[in-house]
Image (cartoon, grey):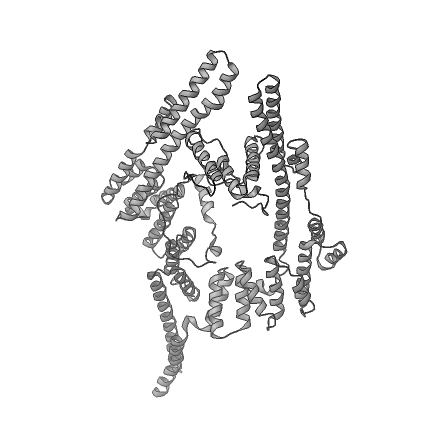
Amino acid sequence: MKSRWLLFILVIFFQQGFAQIQLEEQLAFVESLFAQEKYFDAITEAKRLSFFDSSNQYSYKVNSLIAESYKSGNKLSEAVNYFTKAERESRNPEELFSTKIKIIKINILRRAFYLADHQLVELERDTRFIADSSSLRYWRGWNYLFHDDWQQAADEFSGIDSAAALKNICEEVQKRKYSVSFAKGISAVLPGAGQIYTGNYLSGILSLGWNILFGYLTVQAFSAERVFDGMAVGTMLWLRFYDGNLSNAEKFAVEKNEIINNETLNFLQKNYQGLKP
Amino acid sequence: MMQKTIFFVLLSIFPSLLFSQASGLFAPEKRKAFADYLFCEKDYLRASEEYEALNNLNKNDSLSYSIGLCFLKMNEYGKAEDVFYQLRNSTLGEESRLLYLKTSFLLNNNIEEKTDSFSNQFGNKDLETSFRRLDLAAQIKAGMSQASLHSLDTNFEGTDVQLLRSFAENFSHPNRKSPFAAALFSAVLPGAGKIYTKNYGDGITSLIVTSLFSFLWYDNFRAGHPTRAWIFAGLTGFFYWGNVYGSYISARNYNLEKAEELNNEFDSFLNSKNYFVPKKIEGSCK
Amino acid sequence: MKFVFLSLAFSFSLFGQTDWLRWQKAEIKYSEKIDTAERNYSINGSNPFEFLLKASAVTYWFFISDVDGDNCPFDPSCSSFLLESVKASNLVEGTLMFADRFTRDFNVFNRSNYRVTKNRRLADPPEKYLLTNASTKVK
């Protein structure tokens, strides 16, 4: 009787063992597909693993791999979805923290500034992660950087030794950027000046020329008491080109700043060696 | 006794070993279960790939049918139509014929001839009802005759009948504006054609702009400024003929928009009712 | 409050449809796409009239349109609409289409029937007004 029980236990034990081996093999298969950058197939196989993993022992790993695959395919909403599932399945504070940071990184990338900021604040308030405060500051810096707030980003990076290069880059960008209000302000005083300030010399000179011409014609019409002509030229031509001059000064400054932002972001993406979103 | 035990242990392990090597997670029945799970999760492309792999191993009508359903769900109507057509005389022939007609209908293909050839080919009562409803929906879109309207009463229920009657009425007598009338109205009074097509803002603008330039033309002639008068005459003509042309186009676009609106409304009504899908397709997913 | 709205905006997933087509690895660009309505300043044309029309349009863009601010609410602008209309039809029809568009540009009453583009302009492509067009669907 005893030996039959032993036999039964052994059979169960071996079958469990083989099922475990199958799941392990499947996980290795998923990881190899991921390594080969076959992300769509990696997700299929990860889902298969998840489907047959009745005890959910691979849940964290599988959901993280699916999320990473989606991220590699630039499918960021889906990636967040699966990182959130992984977060629920995390088995210790380290896994929880690392998954939350991965979600924050995606929110930084998709420029969900307030959402990422809120998540960073939540992590800062969590007493389990007090020791990780410099890591949180680092990602807050990146969040500001993607939010076009380079000065604030530089402030966050200052004091973090590993982020000294990032701090310098942010400060450099802040110096290079054009002041939109200054461009508009000087164009209000002298038409075309804002365009010249942003390097659009031809547009600035043309703007100045039209404003001088139509301003002169308006003044001349009023001086000759041709009120109707003065009103017509003043509103339909002078005002039109004066407004155009203001909006162009603003537009050029904004465009130049966007170009500076993009150049720097491209540089960081391709050349920065440290941690990136 | 000891030998016997060892023999039993080996006998028990052997199938497990064999099972893990030869089949594992990719065993056909496991694969089928996984494919069904993917289908219910609306992961239709992956589901179709799994069904396809199984079908390649062992061709089976049920698997082909599932592949067709995946295509249908992914709005790949052309591919779905092909699959269901192939299955029209299979063991799932009745369902396939119905879904073949449905995909053709969704592809905006004329299904009149097809419904004629498939009529009286449905033994199942539910499928027969779905077929007749699909046939009637196609007739409504094509402009149903007054004589056929009564068949809506016997094949649909409740408030749907009234709605379908009103769709039938709208399809056979669409709300149209005549482009020629619109152009003519605007030729007589600038902007009137656009107002006729319910484009009130553009109509009033046309009237103001054309009137203003006409006045300037007249006023400059009266004041003895012929050059300016000719310039304003040219501008008046420019805006006047633009208004006639624009009114014609406005009526034409009005008709196109109304036709599109009606089609969209009818399609969403049919979608919400899900009249033509055999019940067992949806029933398998919780 | 902003956070709540953003959470909602990003919380729903288009999961199913995302994977209804096979996809490959794709780079996530750090830089943002700058939306500027670039004009084609090259002067060319298949006949002398088209050449002249394009030359006039380029001159108008350079000396006036580019410096008098954003006055046209439409996409394409009125001058581009004229060029595209003539190209898509003929001189007479293109001019009539332009005259109609110019009138609609003056409309201050109601412009709700246009789709708003990414550049916050009103989508109004010439093909919608061609005599041969059979659909009102706008690109």
Q: Which quadrant of the figure contains the N terminus of chain B?
A: bottom left
Q: Is residue A179 left or right of residue C118?
A: left
Q: Is residue A51 left or right of residue B240?
A: left
Name the foreground residue: A58 vs A184.
A184
Q: Is residue B177 left or right of residue B5?
A: right
In the image, residue B206 lies at what x, y percent? 61, 31
In the image, residue B277 lies at what x, y percent? 61, 62
Above or below, comparing residue B19 to residue A161 in the picture: below
Name the foreground residue: A185 vs C42.
C42
Above or below, comparing residue B81 to residue C34 in the picture: below
Name the foreground residue: B182 vs A16.
B182
Q: Is residue A51 visible?
A: yes
Q: Is residue B155 left or right of residue B220?
A: right
Residue A121 image-quadrant placement: top left
Above or below, comparing residue A10 to residue A247 in the picture: below
Q: Is residue B278 visible?
A: no
Residue B273 image-quadrant placement: bottom right
In the image, residue A216 lies at what x, y percent? 42, 17
The residue sitting at 37% across, 42% down in the picture is A117
Residue C4 image-quadrant placement: top left
Q: Which quadrant of the figure contains the C terminus of chain B?
A: bottom right
- Figure disc tally: 0
In the image, residue B170 lies at what x, y percent? 69, 48
The residue sitting at 59% across, 47% down in the picture is C134
The residue sitting at 58% across, 67% down in the picture is B85
List the single residue furthest toward the front. C48
